[in-house]
Image (tube, rainbow, N blue to C red):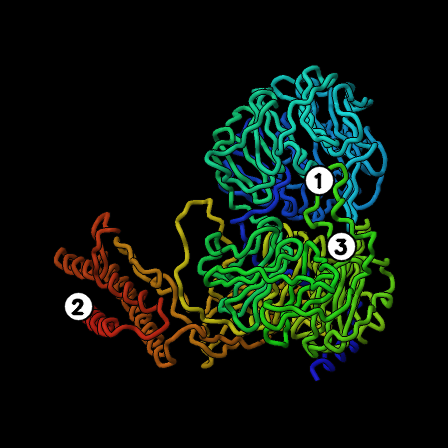
Amino acid sequence: MRKVFFALAFALTAAAQDDLKLDSSTLGGLRARAIGPAVMGGRIAAIDGTAGSPATVYVGAAGGGVWKSTDHGTIFKPVFDDHIQSIGAVTVDKSNPNNVWVGTGESWVRNSVSVGDGVYKSTDAGATWTNAGLGGTEHIARIAVDPKKSDTVFVCATGTLWSPNEERGVFRTTDGGKTWKKVLYVDTNTGCADISMDPGEPQILYAGMWQFRRQPDFFTSGGPGSALYKSVDGGETWAKLKNGLPAGQYGRIAVAVAPSRPSTVYALVEAKKTALYRSDDLGEHWREVNDSFNVQVRPFYFAHVVVDPKDHNRVYKPGYSLTFSDDGGKTFSNSGVGGSSVHADHHALWIHPNDPSMMIAGTDGGAYQSFDRAQRWRHLNVLPVSQFYHVNFDMDTPYNVYGGLQDNGTWMGPSQAPGGISNHDWRVLGGGDGFAVATDSVDPDVVYLESQGGRLVRTRRSTSESKEIYPYATKAEAKLRFNWNTPIYTSPTQKGVVYVGAQSLMRSRDSGESWERISPDLTTNDQKSQRQLQSGGLSIDNSSAENYTTIITISESPKNPAVLWVGTDDGNVQVTRDGGKTWTNVVTNVTGVPARTWVSRVEASHFDENTAYVTFDGHRTGDMKPYVHRTRDGGKSWESLATNDIRGFAHVVREDLVNPNLLFLGTEYGLYMSLDAGRNWAHFRENFPPVPVYDVKLHPRDGDAIIGTHGRGIWIVDDLAPLRALTPDALQQDVVMLPSRASVLKIPAFGGRSEGDTLYESGSMGDVASITYYLKKRHIVGDSKVEVYDADGKLMATLPAGKRRGINRVDWAMRMPPPKMPTGSAIIFSGGSMVGPRAPAGTYTVKFLKGKETYTSKLELVSDDRARYTAEDRALQQKSVRRLYEMIGEFTALTEQVDKLRAEAKTPAAKKKLEDLYASLTSTREGGWLSGEEQLRERLGMLYGAINLYDGRPTDSQLAEIEVVAEELEKKKAQLPR
């Protein structure tokens, strides 16, 4: 019946939607809550700082934007949140530090790399940014600014990763980014990997050009287009450098001029034998100096060389680890004392120009800082730039969130915590690259997680005990093929059933102890696409990242467990209606999507077993369009839900659990929502950056949307009830009071730590109830406010109203105003004395007053299920707190009256009597805030605060003390002169 109602509502209002289109402003009152984590960081792609201000540094994350610190890395603030979050290069203008250049699109081009949209420039030290062009470059490796001419800038554009393009190579501007000239170009398959400028003679430049290509099943680094170039006329002409460099084809090339002696140049050259080369005559002649492991390892991913700014013979090689040489590259040693204390995979290194002992390294695990030339490091774990592939949840109270991260294992953390969620609240469950994670439907202590290539593990939260449970093929079966990002899926209807995807769908009914194939090969099984063992080009790189022709997404119908959907990386959409006995590939019924396009997500409807959603991701073949489709007839026909409102290729689609017309779409450029079953989409970006959204999960009990981003950690949109009620018809109304979930009177709990400013903490919910309404137009003229009344019609609170167009949320603290306490010299050591009594559980009336109009709704407050006290205990506590609250009011009035009378006293005797009375009411000892002096003020405040911070029954001593202070208050009142 509910399905029919929503469908009818959609049909009746379809035409009306054209009059008022859903947009980002409509969703503006919804806020996403970032919960981190920052404890494990994420990949850092670029770092730069300033010579004149050693405390200022900019950090560019692979998928998490640009962050700035002005206090040596103690605190970082995001400064790029309105723009694409994938960063390839950050460069500060040496002659004018207010000029900062950012190249978007990371150039460490692994298979999960995000894309950019050109070059940005700030002229106010990162406060604001302007797009300066080169939007088609997709990936930018480096930016070099002429230290003598700020308007002359060179951009080293790697170019598109998955397809050929013209907009790659070296670009130059001489007018500060207004116009660009392509000054070095090889072909559509070759881009710029690195550029280095002679600081004394900026007309001299070196550039490494790199031929490369990724395909869904293969990666090629190297070819005839790769070469090392030099220009001596500011980029007008370039010459290949060959003398002393290896014969044959090259791959990626890194180049670095020694700042203290520019005639010395280092080049890391990927070749048949990858090695570090050195020139001492401005690149005219080269000699090989080192081919150690960290120099050679994964040159496409670690092509970076940094020379000490004061010592031309001290060279750093960021790679799998960070190594350094003090003899011009002949020998290298590992940084760090007593073994590695830094996350592996180094991609960036900034050394302070005036003090080479100070540096910041960027790794796959975040940023690290050293003040002793790379011997000891501290982790700057305040950067929430973690890169999640998948997220999930459990049913604890509050629930926990889980997720697998790029090169940082699988983690879990609470959805909320007193005072906010900090690094301490997160714990690691598994290692490797973390991907899919799922909680067990039978034993809540069990979690399934996967690292690259199908390494499936079952772990226990309570003990951290882990067991590898991935399935093997039998003798008679073909070897199982697992994607780098293998899906794990627990049945929503069958207790204990777990699915895992290889080329066939595998099912376990006993927590992974045994497995059965319930399908044939559901992929194309294209033999030509199963060549991952040869992947890499000049340097074989077989990390399972190119595993192909595999299942990538699984979904079971919550309405019928026999209906299963599977999507593969090579473009098949398979469905079974009999629990896996027979399968049908329905992808040929999808129109408008190129064949063999990666199926990024399949989602079975929660309302109809014949309905499913699918997103296709074509960016691995250079197709950046978003593809979102829905079937209502079991895959026989499909309709496209992609509109011009959507930007970025699609990663995930989710249907709401309550309202089938409410859809969520995660793309490369952020989160989108639809209120009308996909007819219109709005970009959700009020406080949410345009970061890749890889996963969305909806919590069935709490009604939250859990957002897994690939670059900015996990976010939660709390309480979807208002959004579920914002139907297309509601959008046409001037004002709509929207429902909210019942607000929990959470157990008062202490939260907070004193660990300095480097403690990352976020995601605090606050102990509030949300009042939500919708405005068709912004309220401009007349007063507006929100009032809350209890069941007896008593006014509990008056709150300022939101006036913005679209959704507005007003928070009420669910308490009366704080008690008015008279001043005193002693501090009252109880946090509960600073807040008013709690509102009791029950139904409250909310009135939104807009000009002359009044709109009403209901608000439900409920007790915390975790509390162990009875309703009678609560009632006694509330009665006691209210009594003390009123006593404090009487006491304050008495104190103020005594203070007034003593000021007006006519005789010394009268004044002395009033002074003594006042001193018996409140602490008056000079400098006595820590004196421990207790008068009636302090006793009342401490007693009220103690009872106010615990919702259960007060102690017998507290109840007795209430009578004591009440009697004493009456005595004090009796002493007042008549």
Percent across and percent down for residue 721 are 61, 72
Q: Which residue is mark 1?
A: 107
Residue 229 sits in quarter: top right
- Is residue 227 visible to the viewer in this orientation of the structure? yes
Earlier sequence position, callout 3 versus callout 2: 3
Are circles 3 and 2 on residues that touch, CB within 8 Å?
A: no
Quarter of the figure with the N terminus: bottom right
Q: Say which residue appears at 60% left-offset and 54% top-offset.
A: 434
- Secondary structure category for the residue under label 3: loop
Marks 2, 1: nearer the viewer: 1
Please name which of the two marks, 3 or 2, marks the residue nearer to the observer: 3
So how many labels did they put on this image?
3
Q: CA distance from mark 3 to mark 1?
A: 23 Å
Residue that appears at 65% across and 22% down: 289
Residue 812 drawn at (x, y percent): 49, 67
Disc 3 to disc 1: CB gap under 8 Å: no
- Label 2 neighbourhood size at 10 Å, few (<14), some (14-19), many (20+)? few
- Give, as a three-letter code, the residue at label 1: Ser
* Extreme residue toward the left, this view: 909
Question: What label does residue 548 carry, if any?
Answer: 3
**Helix, strand or loop at disc 2?**
loop
Q: Which image quadrant for residue 17?
A: bottom right
